[in-house]
Amino acid sequence: MTDEWLSLSDTAKLLGVHPSTIRLWSDKGAIPVHKTQGGHRSYKRGEILLWAESNSKSKKETIEPEGMMNEVVKNVRMQISEGRLQEEAWYQKLDEDARAQYRMSARSLFQGLMTYTATNGEEAASEAYAIGYEYASRARRYNLSYVDAARAFLFFRDTLVESVIKVYSEANVPTRRATDIYSRMHTFTDEILISLLDTYRKLENANQ
């Protein structure tokens, strides 16, 4: 039984982590993995159980968050590409150049959130202001109202939050830790929205 071969998903279930975590551990050489002739990852149950007994706790703590964040990015891209963005009324008002700029908005928002999380909020104020300014100035440049500017931001914010919730739920992240992450995300993105509205007002007043 200990010589049984396991797939990547079977190994993830055995260890109780998300498949993306196993993929990341494998690529970093942090877990025993074998490659088939077709290039697929496979694992021996005995090797995995021995690895889990010896050092899975420390490996999980250092690598799992990165793996989950990679999965969040993939999920956000999928949500945008599945047509949800095209259904937004504010998006339909834009030309192709403007649409391309807004599709990049998810990336800046995600990077800002990661910076906020990694620095324990030390750069939160300046990071939130910078992202809010970016959304406000872009909306003004493409003649969107402040209402549409807020809707555009909330679309990307909600897509990101939904993706984090989905990935964390699938990874069985402890409730206390997940709740803390969700709370921090909303605190940070609320600051961005305030910055967006304040910046839009200032830009509008300056052009009157």
Image (cartoon, rainbow, N blue to C red):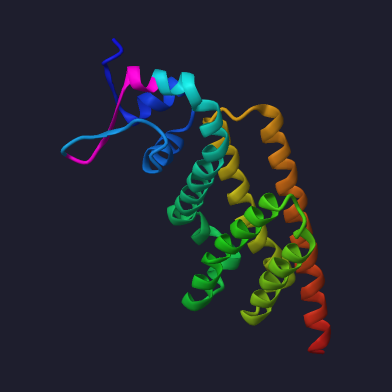
**In the rendered structure, which segment of residues is drawn in magenta?**
38-48
Looking at the picture, how far across and down is residue 54, in whole percent? 48, 21
Depth check: give the residue in front, 151 or 67.
67
168 on left or right of 193: left
For the N terminus, give its image quadrant: top left
**Residue 45 highlighted magenta (yes or no):** yes
15 vs 112: above or below: above
**Picture coordinates of residue 25, whole percent (x, y):** 42, 38
- Residue found at x 37% / y 29%: 9
Residue 64 image position (x, y, % from top left): 53, 37
Task: Residue 53: say if magenta.
Answer: no
Q: Is residue 182 visible?
A: yes
Work out whether 52 lies above or below 40.
above
Q: Residue at x 59, y 43 (%)?
A: 164
What residue sits 55% from the left and 27% below the top?
57
Q: Position of residue 191 (x, y in %)?
A: 78, 58
Residue at the image position 52 percent from the left and 41 percent from the top: 68
Closest to the observer, 143 or 166: 166
Q: Quadrant of the C terminus?
A: bottom right
Residue ranking furthest to the top: 1
Residue 40 as seen in the image, left or right of residue 63: left
Most foreground residue, 144 or 153:
153
Q: Is residue 102 left or right of residue 96?
A: right
| Tally of numbered discs | 0
Farthest-out residue, left: 37
Residue lying furthest front in this view? 54
